Image: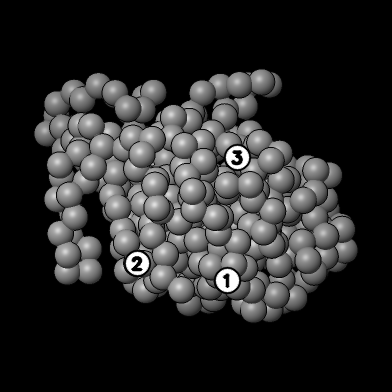
Amino acid sequence: RKVNVVIVGATGAVGQELLNILDERNFPINELKLCATSRSAGTNIQFQGRNYIVEETTKDSFKGMDIALFAGGKASLEFAQAAVESGCVVIDNSSNYRMDPAVPLVVPEVNPEDVKWHKGIIANPNCSTIIMVVALKPIYDAAGIKRVVVSTYQAVSGAGKEGIEELTAQVKAILDGQEYPPNKFAHQIAFNLIPHIDVFQEMDYTKEEWKMVKETQKIMHDEQIKITATTVRVPVYRSHSESINIETERKLTSDEAKAILAKAPGIIVQDDVANKVYPMPLFTSGKDEVFVGRIREDNTVDNGLNLWVVGDQIRKGAATNTVQIAELLLKYDCLMEKK
Ligand code: 2RA
């Protein structure tokens, strides 16, 4: 079956990647519509040899469409309900609906079946959460998880185009002996790292840190997992990295963990320290898998493991995960009646 797809936010980084992934995965599109804010309306975009003119998103943009892919931001607050009323299933990359109990929050390698109970909106989790849960799930299934301590090393592209531009311009300016005051980031990001992503909230944790806690518990259907996170912006263009310490219910040796992770969907194990093989953001960018290495036992607790996990946050952390959810809608035949 071929379906009618509308992308809201088609001109941004995630929107562009959504188009690449729909094309690469040969998603069965009948009609495609590209929408964005009035500022980007009129932009020409090529897709599969055809030219598309980006339209301004309105409440009528969803008539006759089956699936709406929202690239992120505030648009879903304004338009998701109109899309659902038109009989169009929304897959939303923003944080607007993620913690709504009536909205499934889905990572296809972890909780694919949650797609089945959607009532029109399905939320795509935060990028650093997606990358972490893909690696946690096979460990959880094999040995249970009591506690997770995670520190992230997040690329500047997680903060959008301005993040990339600020790093480039600041590096150049500083090498030329010039000043380049921070704008997108709270402090200089060139030759630095910043332990602060998004706003500070309760207990002095950032919103990004709370997302990793709460979204993980919702996706894994387990509010008992204890998670504590420190999220850090680093001067890397693309791919988020995460140092993850896991306390399991039952003992897993590092060899067992390696074997389990190597068989798990969506994961590539890169772990050969004798040959200096481990995942690095420079080499995971542009890929859809989550890369896991430095797999070792934590000998300070009874059942402890350390993992180093890296993934392209614009692909698996956003666009690829969104398109995989759309594929599940077709697989489980759970689109809505068009109105
Ligand atoms: C970041 N998690 O890297 C965000 C993007 N969603 O800033």
Q: Is residue 125 visible?
A: no
Question: Looking at the picture, does residue 109 appear above or below residue 59?
Answer: below
State the CA–CA distance, disc 3 to disc 1: 22 Å
How packed mark 2 is, by other alpha carbons closer than 10 Å (few <14, some 14-19, many 20 or more), is few
Frontmost of labels 3 and 1 is: 1
Q: Are marks 1 and 2 in contact (CB under 8 Å)?
A: no
Residue for point 34% across, 43% down:
61
Judge left or right: residue 175 versus residue 254.
left
Residue for point 23% across, 42% down:
55
* Mark sitting earlier along the chain (3/2): 2
Q: Which residue is mark 3?
A: 98
Q: Is mark 3 within 8 Å of ligand 1?
A: no
Labelled disc at residue 213 = none
Q: Which residue is mark 2?
A: 30
Element type where label 1 sits in the image:
helix
Q: Are marks 3 and 1 in contact (CB under 8 Å)?
A: no
Element type where label 2 sits in the image:
strand
Return the x and y of residue 276 as percentages of the image width and height.
47, 71
Looking at numbered disc 3 in the image, what kind of residue is underneath it? Answer: Arg
Question: Looking at the picture, does residue 119 appear above or below residue 285?
Answer: above
Q: Is residue 104 visible?
A: yes
Frontmost of labels 1 and 2 is: 2
Task: Work out which residue is located at the far left of the displayed protein and give it.
Answer: 176
State the CA–CA distance, disc 1 to disc 2: 17 Å
* Mark sitting earlier along the chain (3/1): 3
Judge left or right: residue 251 versus residue 28.
right
Looking at numbered disc 1 in the image, what kind of residue is underneath it? Answer: Lys
Labelled disc at residue 331 = 1
